[in-house]
Amino acid sequence: MATTNPTRGDAVRTDIDWAYKALADPIRRSLLEALGKKQYFCRVDGEKVNGVCVQDLSSLLQLPQSTVSRHLAVLRQAGLVGHRQKGIWHYYFCNIDRIRAVQRWLDSLVTEEESGADIR
């Protein structure tokens, strides 16, 4: 990724590295897919909550709650998911801005390739 500010470029590459490491695991990809589908979002006392709780994700993916929590922690560290707390419950959701940044980075590679630029 070409940039005139080396510090900013390094930060972007680090963010991309974390994101792709997180995306390397099929369970984490499944969690993102579930979080991307609005039909799984929760209601608390009749109020729609922007996110899905760990218990519901665990049930949906048929995985132990501890496994889901561990994978959500990795996704949070990579910035791919966020969470909100309501009472004692934590609700997770996709961080669309970070996901779009990862997508833009990939798109930039395709654009360079299509323009005939040597990316080696």
Image: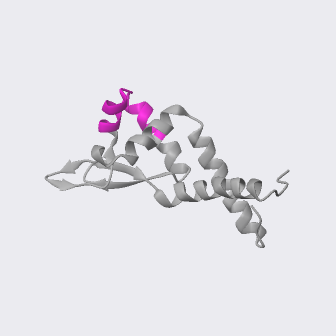
- Relative to residue 27, is residue 1 depicted above or below? below
Examine the structure image and report whether residue 68 is included in the region drawn in magenta.
Answer: yes
Near-viewer residue (8 or 32): 32
Along the viewing direction, whichever of 114 and 87 lies nearer the viewer: 114
- The residue sitting at 45% across, 36% down in the picture is 30
Residue 23 location, quadrant: top right
Task: Left or right? Give the position of 70 relative to 85.
Answer: right
Magenta-drawn stretch, dominant element (helix, strand or loop): helix
The location of residue 57, given as percent across then percent down, is 34, 37
Tell me the residue at 82%/58% (across/down): 117
Split into 4 quadrants, where in the image is the N terminus?
Answer: bottom right
In the image, residue 2 lies in the stretch drawn in magenta: no
Q: Position of residue 68 (x, y in %)?
A: 42, 35
How many tags in the picture?
0
Q: Residue at x 76, y 69 (%)?
A: 3
Residue at 67% over, 49% down = 17
Residue 94 position within the rendered picture, expressed as x and y whole percent measured from the top left = 43, 52
Give the camera-side residue of 7 and 111. Answer: 111
Q: Furthest-left residue in view?
A: 46
Q: Return the residue nearer the eye: 104 or 113.
A: 113
Q: How is the image coloured?
A: one colour
Please tell me whether residue 82 is drawn above or below residue 67 in the rendered image.
Answer: below
Chain part drawn in magenta = 55-71
**In the rendering, at what x and y percent does residue 70 appear?**
47, 37
- In the picture provided, is 82 more to the left or to the right than 2? left
